Structures are given as C-alpha cells and as structure tokens.
Amino acid sequence: MVQPFTNITEANGAAGGGRPTAAPLPSAPPMDSPANDDQYVDFLLYGNKENYLVRAERKAILDSNTGLAQMVSSGNCGGNNKCVVRDVNRNNFETFVRYLETKFIKFSSPKHALEMLDLATQFQCRQLELHCLKELDLNLSVDHLLDVYQALFIYNSIAPPKASAKDSKRRSRCPRAQKANTASGPLTPEEYFAALLNNCLQLIDMQAEEVFSQEGMLKLCFSQLEMIMKRDALQMSSETVLLDVLARWSLEDCKRKHIDPTAENRRRALGALCYAPRYLTMSRREFDAARERVELLDPAESQLVGDILTGGMRRMPANLTPEQQALVARFKEPRPEFPMLPVHLSARSHPRNYPKKMRKAAANAERERDGPKKGCCNGLLLNICSVFACIFD
C-alpha cells in the first residue's frame, strides 16, 4: 500500500497506520508489536510535489538478491527500517515491490513493460528483466517497435547476436542433434537483450515500409539508423523507400545541428549510409527521381550508376578501379525474398507462426552459410544411402 506523507514525522505516523494526532489510550495491547515491525521495511519515495511510503516484507526483499536487498542488508535504512528511494514512479515501484513478494506481475501495456524493465535494470532484478523481455517479444508490433528498439540501446550496449551464426556452423546435421539444438536458446539476461534486439530488427525487415513511414525513424541517432539501413533482408517494393528515409533523416539531422541542409552536409551526416541503397536494382527513372530529392552519391558515382542503368551491365565501363568494381557489385546485389526467422523467445516468435516458404528459405540460407560438413548426416553420406536404397529396392 502506498501512503502519502510530507515529512519524516508524518512518515513514521503513516507507517504505524495513522497520523500523529492525539488519540485515547488503548484498552488492549497494540497489534503491531515491535516484533511484527521487524518483519517489514518501509521505502520512502521523495518526489517533486509529494512524498510516499511503500511498505514491503523484509524477508522477500532480502531474498530477492536485488539492489533493494543490498540497500536493506547494508544498513542504509537505519534503525527505523526506512530506506529512501529517489527518482522512481511510485506506482511502478510498488508494482516492483509486490513482484518481489509474490513473483507475479501483470503488465498493462508494452509501455508499462518497458517502464518495469527500467526498474528491473536499475535495481538489478535479473528475473524480472527476463520476464519483461519475454513480455515485450510476445506483444512486439509495428506500433511500438521503434520504442522497444531504442530502449535496448539505453539499457545495454549490445549488438545483434552473432554467436548464433557460429553456433549454427558447429551444429550437427543429424536430425536428433538439430532437435536438441532448437530446444536451447538464450539463457542470461544479456543473451535475452541481444535476442530481443535481433527480433526487433527481424520485424523491421518484414515490415520495412510501414516502419520507415513513421516519424520515429527521424528521431533515431546515427548508430541506431545505421544498424537498420545496413540490413540485407529489408522487404521493400523499391529501393526508393530506403532513399526516402535517408533523405528525410539527413534533412532532420541538419536541422538538429543548425547547419545548412546542403547536399554535401547531408552526405556528411549519412556517411557510409549513402551507399546502403541497391541503386542498380532500380530503374533509371526511379534513380533520376531520387537524385532530384537528394544527391547521396558524388557526381562521378552518380554518372557511373546512371550509365550502367542506361546501357545495362554488359556496357559497363571496363576501366573501373577495384573500389568501383566492389561498389557496383554491392549496388546490383538483390535482396533476399524472405528475411531470417526470429529467435524463439515467446509464442509470437515461434517458427510455426511464419510461412513455410520463409522457414524453408531461412533453412537454405543457414545451409549455405554453414558450407560443406563432415558430420554424420552430410550430403555425401545421404547420397551413398540413397544409392544403396535404390540397389536393395
């Protein structure tokens, strides 16, 4: 129960069940004896306009192994069992305390789950962190996708999990071994943070056009924008969708920095992201229309792309430098038809919820990335088994 108070004297009265006013002498012993008071600890929440008191079970707090447990066990609460907590939302803090007591929490919205994740991280409650991350993955949608994506950068300096690719390379082709591997997943909060970030990026891949149309894209910092723009599997009807985002973000960035939005300043703001679009998968008309909005390439690069789009790849200039050849190869590389599957964190991200073609494409991409194997079920062994099956048939 949260009780408001204005000073320490009043807090002491609130902890005892009422304000320190004159009262008739009791005719029976008080129910709250000192022995019972030792079962509880009071947290005093100091706010800008009003202060509050939250009472919690001492044993539940000490058993939680969180920052609150360290606060209580270290003696910072003093002899009156009152600990001061600042800069927290009183309703969320009481929800956090009740979770430590009951191990149960009910989230009212994805925003609430993010707020509770903030408290769990602040007070080092690993179990609640996992609970919040699973809840966010379960209800992940385009409406609040960018909010979750940005929050992951605030709470932890993380990157999408690259270890999964290494793990898949070590994975056996044996069906029983594969089944055992699929049952495993992220274990630590750090792995869950990375997996949820991966799932945010995977959903951005699938819903790229809808996400890119949101104003939240313009509020991303460069590192957040870069991680999205460099994705290979962005599902878009045309590369002009990507160009439009880069044009709007570069203009907004110039406004934030109070500099003239010249073509040079906008290219400088985007840096290497100027080369993110696959220009040679566009038509010449689309490329010219994009150049009218923003000139992301320098004149020589624009001339090269324009000449190739006009004459085709067969009439590509022969005297290209190695850097230009690599640029042309990057510009003409088509995007995959399907993105990779998300990491299975909740019922939403279970593989069975995605089309069969997408699951098959993800499996084929994984096999291509793994390369030839020498395991028990490699392609050579399967071919030998097929020959013997035909012989004995």
Image (cartoon, helix red, strand yellow):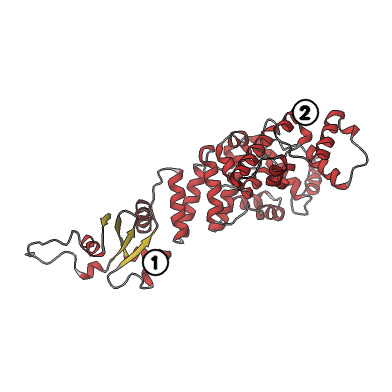
Q: Earlier in the sequence, mark 2 or mark 1?
A: 1
Side of 224 where 265 appears, left or right: right
Q: Kindly tell me whether residue 81 is visible in this rendering.
A: yes
Whether 186 is drawn above or below 32: the answer is above
* Residue at mark 2: 283
The residue under the point 55% across, 48% down is: 150
- Mark 2 closeness class: few <14, some 14–19, many ≥20 residues within 10 Å: some
Side of 186 where 10 appears, left or right: left
Q: Where is residue 80 drawn, in percent x and y?
A: 27, 70
Q: Nearer the viewer, mark 2 or mark 1?
A: 2
Q: Where is residue 16 drawn, in percent x and y?
A: 20, 62
Side of 33 where 74 appears, left or right: right
The single residue placed furthest to the top in the displayed view is 285
Provide the secondary structure element on which disc 1 rests. helix
The single residue placed furthest to the right in the displayed view is 318
Side of 166 where 143 appears, left or right: left
Front residue of 224/235: it is 224
Q: Kindly tell me whether residue 230 is visible in this rendering.
A: no
**Separation of marks 2 and 1 at Cα, in angstroms:** 63 Å
Provide the secondary structure element on which disc 2 rests. loop
* Residue at mark 1: 69
